[in-house]
Image (spheres, rainbow, N blue to C red):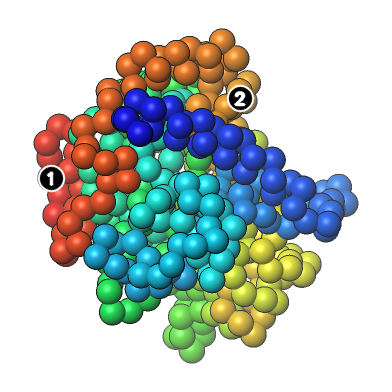
Amino acid sequence: MNKNNQRRHFLKKITLGTTSLLAFPFFSSSKKTETMKENHPIKRIKPLGFQWETIDPFLFCVHHEDQYPKGNEQMGPATSLEGRSIGQDFIIKDGWRMYHGGTVPGFPGHPHRGFETITVVREGFVDHADSTGAAGRYGNGDVQWMTAGKGVQHSEMFPLLSTETENPVELFQIWLNLPGKNKMVEPHFAMLWKDTIPIIKQKDSAGKIEATIELIAGSLKNEKAPIPPPNSWANNSSNSVGIFNLKLEPGAKFELPGTRAGVNRTIYYYSGNGLTIEDHSIPNYHLAEVNSTKTIVLKNGIETSKILILQGKPIGEPVVQHGPFVMNTREEIQQAFNDYHNTKYGGWPWPAYEQVHDRDRKRFALHSDGRLEEKG
């Protein structure tokens, strides 16, 4: 298959795949939303699917967790791929998925326009390449924040670097909308390396750590996260965008301070059992939308709990989404497709759409202006 046909084939797959993923989680559970009484600090509680429901200014969040086996010479799984829908493998089999990858798991080169992707890698590695000539490898606590703006192609592959041990991968990918005035800005990506992300450690009366909070965006308890990209909705502090990853030790209590009125705030309970919010039991793998102006008290049970918190002032504009494009009108979506077919958003300067870097390459970021960041 030549490159043009390969590109069209993949765009069709990711468009259909994204659309189906947007629909699937909302019908994936027989459990219904629990709506709380008026004036309760919790507005509603809802089970999570593969794609997590979010509220303006966020578009969605996906939690990827795959227990990949040892890697082979091509940095793919050192095992048979028989029985998998290669190119569209989203069903957990043996604890992992290939996603759109054919040799290496992940997402080969594909386009975006009109929003931002924030990729929070808890474990494992991601290899990035894009149509601006930028590239990178990041993981184990690093975050990539990419503004797609007027259009960019990028790939996100999960290289299985170890041939001796398993290669688990856990990450969140969060889609943050852009306001109409910034949807056509130049593409940009920034690396928030692990050692630049503030960590708050709350201790109990005996000096033991009971809560650990990573500040990926926003501010909390007098600490501030790294500055987001310049055209991001999160760049203006008055929009109160916050992305916090919280770990609670057994028996811990944590008070999430209130913020300004008009901010949407959602708590995602993705690991553990026994969490209560305002003395209301929250089942594992559920979200709780809460009143952002109230101090919210979280109490943990006997297991370690992990929680992601997303908050932000809504953009309040129409959202029209089709596959990898998010704009304000249907006409703008059609223009996004036309522009992609005509320009390929700068083309693809890499040897393969499943671009992975040398196995021995350490964490790095090569920016489109030639600036190189090397990490250990």
Count of marks overlaid on the render = 2
Q: Is residue 323 visible?
A: yes
In this rendering, is residue 152 above or below 168? Answer: above
> Which element is circle 1 on?
strand
Quarter location, residue 68: bottom left
Q: Residues within 10 Å of mark 1 (few under 14, many from 20)?
A: some
Image point 36% across, 13% down: which residue? Answer: 342
Outermost residue toward the right?
Answer: 37
Q: Which residue is mark 2?
A: 319
For the residue pair 76 and 41, the one nearer the viewer reads as 76
* Residue 235 x/y as whole percent: 39, 35
**Residue 114 percent coordinates (x, y):** 46, 25
Q: Which residue is found at the position 17% from the left and 43% from the top?
A: 366
In the image, residue 84 lies at what x, y percent?
A: 53, 58
Using the image, determine if residue 125 lies above or below residue 236: below
Is 41 placed left or right of 126 in the picture? right
Residue in the picture at 64% in, 85% down: 302
Residue type indicated by callout 1: Leu
73 vs 18, left or right, is left
Instruction: Work out whether residue 234 or residue 80 is closer to the camera in this orientation and state it.
Output: 80
Compared across the picture, whether 47 is left or right of 253 comes to right
Residue 372 numbered mark, or none: 1
